[in-house]
Image (cartoon, rainbow, N blue to C red):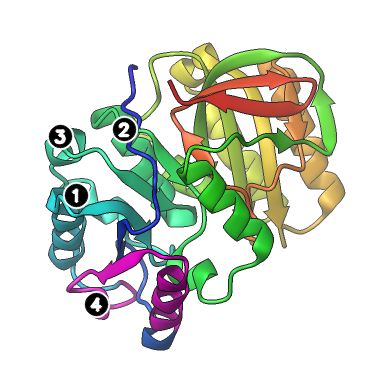
Amino acid sequence: MNLIKPPYLNEGDTVAIIAPAGVVEYDEIIKAQAYLERRNLRVILGKNIFKSYRYMAGTDEERVDDLHEAFLNPDIKAIVCARGGYGAIRLLKLIDFDIIRRNPKIFCGYSDITALSLMFAKHSDLITFSGPMAQSDFNDVTEFTANSFFNVLSGGFEEYMSTETYRSGNTEGIIWGGNLSTIVSLCGINFIPEEDFIFFTEDLNEAPYRIDKMLTQLVNIKEFRKHCKGIVFGEFLDCGDENWVTDILLETANILEVPAYGGFKFTHAADKQTVPIGAYGILQDGILSYKMS
């Protein structure tokens, strides 16, 4: 996997906000647009961003049209997703992955957007970013989150610090992962890298038995076991008995026999770090760093 590094973000660049997943709130998107404009960026909203279909921001065709148009527009240098929720996986059958490959640019989101990021890595060879979204974060963004976002996307150096050790050791590989429940929703299609990776993951509102089931499902996949060389666990928020969750994470690390650390700020919480999916990662003494080239 020789992934494409998109150009860095600079002041004055044009950013598109699109909604590939859940339905959005007008006022929150306008607040996010105003914030990004105060940061000296020009902001374009997807033409279908305020549409709704059931619990999604328009039909599959409308949402994928905004995605394709954002990648095809040469003036747009970065794409920030509006929110997660549900709906991204429904787009996979409609996406022209050659469009993404031929027009590499920053693509950022987390939660349900993980489905798009991992498929872009697999089928468009593009490094994307797990990081803040318009409605979810930029309508009222914390300084911590903003600093990490602009630092990473402008080419600054970023390290990710653990607070817990599950299995000590050092390792290397591409950084790959995201929201656990979304990753598992991809099982059954071709989405796992063919090279060694450091797996990062987090989740929200999932009972311990569901975290157990999802991690077990991944561990049962031969390609996952073969290429997973380390784990960096983010935050598992509102997931029930914390001791049970800790036991499950430790058990997973021991089954895979790889270095594993926890407490990273990969999270649904307000304070989150932006991490490049597909960049080459180095995990050493509980600190994750990366190289973009």
* Of pointers 3 and 4, the one earlier in the residue sequence: 4
Q: Amino acid at mark 4?
A: Tyr
- The 10 Å Cα crowd at callout 3, few under 14, some 14 to 19, many 20 or more, is few
Q: Are marks 2 and 4 in contact (CB under 8 Å)?
A: no
Residue 230: image location, x then y, percent: 64, 21
Residue appearing at x 19%, y 49% in the figure: 71
Residue beneath label 4, please?
53
Measure the alpha-carbon separation of dots 1 and 4.
Answer: 23 Å
Range drawn in magenta = 28-56
Measure the alpha-carbon separation of dots 3 and 2.
Answer: 10 Å
Residue 81: image location, x then y, percent: 37, 60
* Of pointers 2 and 4, the one earlier in the residue sequence: 4
Q: Amino acid at mark 3?
A: Arg
Residue beneath label 3, please?
102
Measure the alpha-carbon separation of dots 3 and 4.
Answer: 30 Å
Residue beneath label 2, please?
126
Could you tell whether 208 is left or right of 64 in the image?
right
Residue 234: quarter of image: top right
* Of pointers 2 and 1, the one earlier in the residue sequence: 1
Q: Amino acid at mark 2?
A: Leu
Residue beneath label 1, please?
71
